[in-house]
Amino acid sequence: MGSPIKDSSNQVIFLKHRLNSFLDLLEAIDPEEADLDDIDRMIAIVEEMDAKCREFKNRDL
């Protein structure tokens, strides 16, 4: 893994890139063909972003 992102502007940039990647994934998935594995993966991505937000918040304290 890379070094921790300590600068708040870089933290925001990281989260924006991660969110844009998630939005691209949502647009690419066909709702008629999505299965539980696809949904589980999307939930995992959201949970990872949430954990990263909490991590960044705690670094700023």
Image (tube, grey):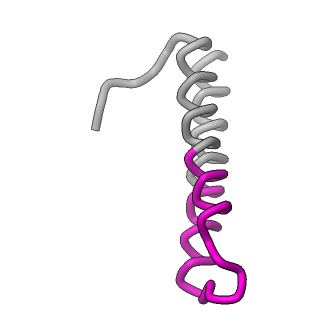
Q: Dominant secondary structure of the magenta stretch?
A: helix
Residue 9: x percent and y percent? Answer: 60, 12
Is residue 30 shown above or below 16? below
Magenta region: which residues? 21-47
**In the displayed structure image, the side of residue 4 where residue 37 appears, left or right:** right
Assign the C terminus to one quadrant of the image: top right
Of 40 and 58, the residue lying toward us: 40
Looking at the image, is 37 positioned above or below residue 14?
below
Which quarter of the rendered picture does the N terminus lie within? top left
Q: Quadrant of residue 11?
A: top right
Vertical side of 19 occupied by 32: above or below: below
Going 61% across and 46% down the picture, which residue do you hit? 49
Is the residue 30 above or below the residue 7 in the image?
Answer: below
The answer to which quarter of the image holds residue 20 is: top right
Is residue 24 rendered magenta in the image? yes
- In this rendered view, identify the residue nearer to me: 44 or 37: 37
Left or right for 42, reference 2: right
Q: Is residue 25 magenta?
A: yes
Task: Between residue 30 and residue 7, name the one nearer to us.
Answer: 30
Residue occupying image coordinates x 56% and y 47%: 21
